[in-house]
Image (tube, rainbow, N blue to C red):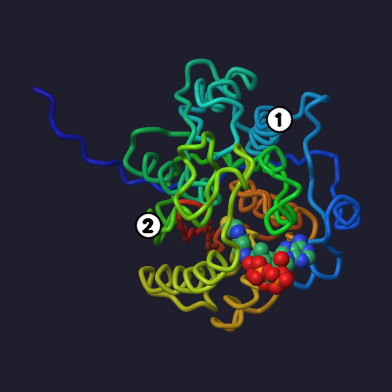
Amino acid sequence: MSMPQTPPARGVTILGTGRAVPEGRLTNQDLEKIMDTSDEWIVQRTGIRERRKCDPSKGESAVSLCTDALTRAIEDSGIDRSEIDLLVIGTVTGEMTCPATACRVGKRVGLGNAGAFDLLAACSGFVYGLNIAHDMIRVGRCRTIAVVGCDVMTEVMDYSNRGVSILFGDAAGAVILQATEDQSQGILASALHANGERWADLYLPRRERDVPDQDDPNELQLGTLQMRGREVYKFAVGTFANLIGETLEKAGIEASDVAQYVCHQSNARMLESARERFGIEQDRMYVNIDRYGNCSAGSVPVCLDELRSVGKCQTGDLVMFVAFGGGLTWASSLWRL
Ligand code: COA
């Protein structure tokens, strides 16, 4: 008779990170040439100056970005790729729904028969994946898990829709998580939330029947992201701050205890408002939206990799990951690295 397993006492560490962004740039000046907008309007409302854009003619895609980011994370972690038990990719822009992007990336990276699946939580996809992967390691189901966040948002933009298309860009970021004997490392508090009642505020319709009653399918381009910008902004600005508050409270710590807030880059004004509410200094809430725009699930892991490459987010630091996105979904993850 098999006995119930007691979870092994173990911590979880982020062993390595990597990122990949396409070389192609789409600046505000480029957008001025194809739509009625201005650099000043975009910078003032969002903080964005340029974004990256995949070039399919060069073979750039969600699969290629994930492959590059994951390869770099494996190199950075120093592990052998055969150690990876599971690959989780948060994305809403995989080329196909079957097979999962993760299966094709696993094949390219050489992960053998490691488990692989995609996770759909829009801009929150990476943080959702991070929480799930962490807990699978903590309870002893897996020893090493790769989590990737990636979106190729330029493929789902309608560039005649200026209220949406100025916001988004393409990127992937990856982390390697592994079990460690140091039980102080890993998640101190986390949150996963969704509110499906608000789904029509941010959605990607494939067919006419996907379009909600309040929108006219003849006035939108199927296969492109639809958004009620002002509603999303109002919801997100409060939710973002509440999520930080909820996570601090669960962990029983103060905002000032956290070394770095690694947040989804949806709008510089939203980040600023959360920063001010908690009195967080500028250098403890990273911003790269000016260079990349909103890269959906790619935003948070790209921020983490950039921070690590300048010596931030070191072992022992308290780091909070925060994201918000379509669904509507929102999630956080507070780590002792
Ligand atoms: N350039 C110039 N003018 C633009 C424009 C653009 N790119 N996009 C919209 N406008 C115009 C609108 O047509 C509107 O004009 P009108 O008053 O004559 O009708 C005016 O600017 C204001 O539009 P509105 O949509 O109310 O602007 P806003 O201040 O809410 O800013 C967003 C728009 C999209 C920047 C803002 O709502 C936002 O950031 N929302 C959250 C989006 C988000 O983060 N989504 C992802 C979540 S993960």
User: Can residue 70 be seen by looking at this rendering?
Assistant: yes
Above or below — where is 334 with respect to 1?
Answer: below
Q: Residues within 10 Å of mark 2 (few under 14, many from 20)?
A: few
For residue 46, say whether it is visible.
no
Q: Position of residue 31 (x, y in %)?
A: 85, 53
State the image coordinates of residue 290 (x, y, percent, origin top left): 78, 61
Q: Mark 2 near ligand 1 (CB under 8 Å)?
A: no
Crowd rating for badge 1 (residues with CA inside 10 Å; few <14, some 14–19, many 20+): many
Q: Is residue 115 above or below residue 223?
A: above
Under mark 2, the amino acid is Glu
- What residue is pinned by disc 1? 61
Q: Which residue carries the number 2 mark? A: 197
Residue drawn 56% across and 39% down? 91
Q: Are marks 1 and 2 in contact (CB under 8 Å)?
A: no
Helix, strand or loop for disc 1? loop
Residue occupying image coordinates x 54% and y 79%: 256
In primary-sequence order, the first of circles 1 and 2 is: 1
Vertical order, 42 against 87 (above or below)? below
Rendered location of residue 136, percent (x, y): 37, 39
Query: Residue 23 lies in what quarter of the image?
Result: top right
Identity of the amino acid at label 1?
Ser
Residue 219 shown left or right of residue 135 in the figure: right
Q: Quadrant of ligand 1?
A: bottom right
Q: How many marks?
A: 2
Residue at horizontal 51%, vertical 68%?
Answer: 240
Cβ of mark 1 under 8 Å from ligand 1: the answer is no
The kind of secondary structure element at disc 2 is helix
